[in-house]
Amino acid sequence: MTVLTCSAVRQRLAAFHDGELPVGERIATQGHLNSCDECAAELDLFSKVGDALRIAAARAPQDDWTGLQSDVISRMRAEAYESWTARVSRLFDDMHLVWIGLASTVATFLCGAIVLGMLHFASPERDDSLRAMIAVVAAPWGSDLNPASLDGLIQAPTVPQDGLVRATLEQSGSQGELMLALSAVVSREGRVSELSVLANDRDRRHIARLLDAISRSRLEPARYGTDPIAVNLVWLVEHMTVRGKLRS
């Protein structure tokens, strides 16, 4: 059997790898490779290079375009269906609903306009007007529009000592005893309004004079803590003159 050197074997490795050597040289080369690790490593490198070349030369699979057209068309249709123009057009598919919606909108605006007109043209001077009632309900407690009722926490209004009411009482009382039950509202500024007589034992002339004096005068307003507030009250007015006789 022919013995080959490493140099001779390496010259034949390419042909050996491809199976192109004659039988005698192939046997001699194989015998050398069995005993020489370096030449065997060279042959293994040839095998790896060949495998890499075969992988690189393999044809890539063709892209699958099946169904692409239908997918694109479906996507375009879905986007068109969800667009704003399509949504608006679908609102008018059933015209019955459109007319119902328009009628409801017009009725709502008409009702609002009527209510605003009533509030605008209603006289605020009348207590039974809608505007006056809404103003009273919206007014805070203790205001002139929503007077409070007297209780233990509210300091009642007082009559000034040197005011018109005192002077009128003195004049009325000079003609005898005076007792009146009055209903009134005293504002936060001390003004008296809605004054009415509940009971009296005097003639109308003296009563009218006293009511006029009370209406034109200003009282010390009621107070809740330190804040003045408007109150409803029933006012009992009593004036008594005591006369004595001189004895000689």
Image (cartoon, rainbow, N blue to C red):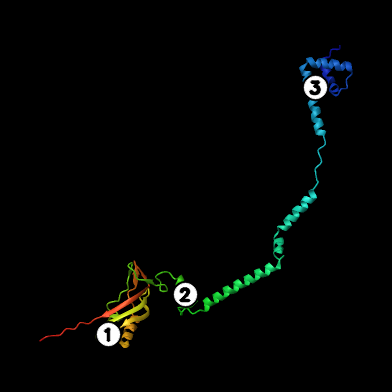
- Residue 213 lies, in percent from the top left, at 32, 83
In percent of the image, x 63 and y 72: which residue is there? Answer: 106
Corner quadrant of residue 200: bottom left
Dot label at residue 172: 1
Q: CA distance from mark 3 to mark 2?
A: 110 Å
Q: In the figure, is residue 48 to the left or right of 170? A: right
Q: CA distance from mark 1 to mark 2?
A: 39 Å
Q: Quadrant of the N terminus?
A: top right
Q: CA distance from mark 1 to mark 3?
A: 144 Å
Q: Is residue 215 above or below residue 137?
A: below
Farthest-out residue, right? 22
Q: In the figure, is residue 173 to the left or right of 68? A: left
Dot label at residue 43: 3
Residue closer to the observer: 233 or 230:
233
Tell me the amino acid under the disc marked 2: Met
Disc number lying in front (1 or 3):
1
